[in-house]
Image (cartoon, helix red, strand yellow):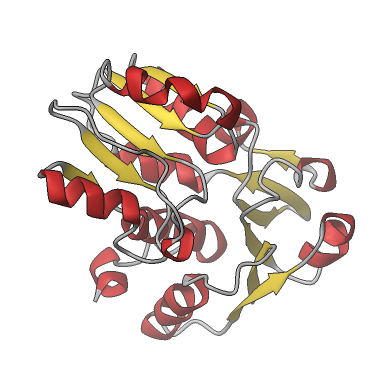
Amino acid sequence: MRLGLLGHRISYSRSPEIHQGWMKRYHLKGSYEIYDCLEDSLAESFARFDGCNVTTPFKTKIKPFIDGMTPLAEQIGAVNTIYREQGLWIGDNTDAIALLEMIPETIKRIIVLGHGGAAKAVKVVGESRGQEVVCIPREQWYDRHRLMDTADMLINATPIGLQGKGCPVDVLPNKNLLIMDMVYEPEKTPLLCLAYDRGYKTLGGLEMLYRQARHSFHRWWGVLPDLEFARS
């Protein structure tokens, strides 16, 4: 089976390492590669694979080129996994499945920095549990520090912090706040470093990567792989 990751400027991705490791562990014959493409070549790009992941900036732009979506992906309006079912291309959102596993049910109010596909996944997951989720697009960031004072959890769903470049906040509030950064390169992003210094509880993007990859792998192979093996 030929698998891959579609996106733009994604050479940093660890997805090939994760999926190839699982394929070797479970004695499955296949490949997983990064495919950097542009929007006008999306349809021909994913047609070269038997299944693929979709990342920045195509999670919402891929929809016109597939045959259908799972109810979860339809609700979110974004796709990060494409698989074949009865000859049709189906889009799923395993980001949301990973978030269901990671966000504590005890959280009452979540502030999300960003308004793209990842932020929409948080909103759908949180609201399905009765949690209040406020997504803040970049043009409204002037209010983000005030809004953090009203939250139990802060999630960075933007690329800010990728390769250690920039932090999406200037300060953190003096309160008990769970901090999650979806960026995983580097593992300790500027936001997480700020949180560590202040003694906050944190969730990293690498753990989310492992979890969403695990459910994508299950879609393609019918095998739910071992998380600990990926972490090691």
| Residue under the point 32% across and 49% down | 191
Q: Position of residue 159 (x, y in %)?
A: 52, 51
Image height of 108 relative to 220, above or below: above
Q: Is residue 171 left or right of residue 80?
A: left
Q: Residue furthest left?
A: 199
Q: Position of residue 158 (x, y in %)?
A: 51, 44
Q: Position of residue 12 (x, y in %)?
A: 52, 72
- In which quadrant of the rendered image does the C terminus lie? bottom left
Would you identify the image quadrant in which residue 5 lies? bottom right
Q: Nearer the viewer, residue 69 or 43?
A: 43
| Residue under the point 57% across and 32% down | 138
Image height of 116 relative to 206, above or below: above
Q: Nearer the viewer, residue 156 or 54?
A: 156
| Residue under the point 37% across and 37% down | 155
Image height of 15 relative to 200, above or below: below
| Residue under the point 66% across and 67% down | 9
Q: Is residue 158 left or right of residue 21?
A: right
Image height of 209 relative to 202, above or below: below
Q: How many marks?
A: 0
- In which quadrant of the rendered image does the N terminus lie? bottom right
Q: Position of residue 4 (x, y in %)?
A: 64, 70
Would you identify the image quadrant in which residue 175 lies? top left
Q: Nearer the viewer, residue 107 or 228?
A: 107
